[in-house]
Image (cartoon, grey):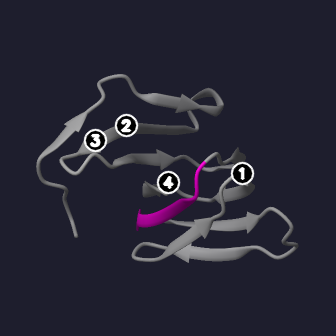
Amino acid sequence: MSKFAQVSVVKQANVYFDGKCVSHTILLADGSRKTLGVILPSTLRFTTGAREVMEGVGGSCRVRREGESAWTTYGAGESFAVPANSSFEIACDEAYHYVCHFG
């Protein structure tokens, strides 16, 4: 799916790591929440409260989930999941555009 229909957008951006990751929250008609964002070239560590599925829509990244020693590469059209109450590292050599699905 290349776009979301019938959404509300939270005006205030989510800015993390001195602007290396910026996203906007969208609220869908069914009550679900997603974020749409971009991670600039960097290596960052995120923690999760809820389960997250990161869907790549542009660029690529390398990911290492909590407890893993190896990095896995993901590109546009590919997704990876991170369990709730966990963490992951993400390394980007180029701008990585994503949709984060919660739950």
Query: Which mark identifies residue 24?
Result: 2
Please tell me which residue is depicted at 22% across the width and 51% down the height of the picture: 30
Position of residue 85 measured from the top left corner of the image (x, y, whole percent): 71, 51
Q: Which residue is mark 1?
A: 85
Q: Amino acid at mark 3?
A: Leu
Please tell me which residue is depicted at 49% across the width and 57% down the height of the picture: 103
Alpha carbon distance from label 3 to label 2: 10 Å
Give the secondary structure at mark 1.
loop
Give the secondary structure at mark 4.
loop
Give the secondary structure at mark 2.
strand
Q: Answer whether residue 54 is magenta in the image.
A: yes
Relative to 69, say whether 5 is above or below. Answer: above
Position of residue 101 measured from the top left corner of the image (x, y, whole percent): 43, 57
Position of residue 23 measured from the top left corner of the image (x, y, whole percent): 43, 39
Count residues near mark 1 (Cα–Cα under 10 Å), then give few for <14, some for 14-19, many for 20+: few
Is 7 on the left or on the right of 72, as rendered? left
Q: Nearer the viewer, residue 96 or 24?
A: 24
> What are the residue bounds of the magenta stretch?
50-57
Alpha carbon distance from label 1 to label 2: 22 Å
Q: Nearer the viewer, residue 25 or 20?
A: 25
Relative to 63, say whether 34 is above or below. Answer: above
Q: Earlier in the sequence, mark 3 or mark 1?
A: 3
Q: Residue furthest front?
A: 30
Q: Which residue is mark 4?
A: 95
Please name which of the two marks, 4 or 2, marks the residue nearer to the observer. Answer: 2
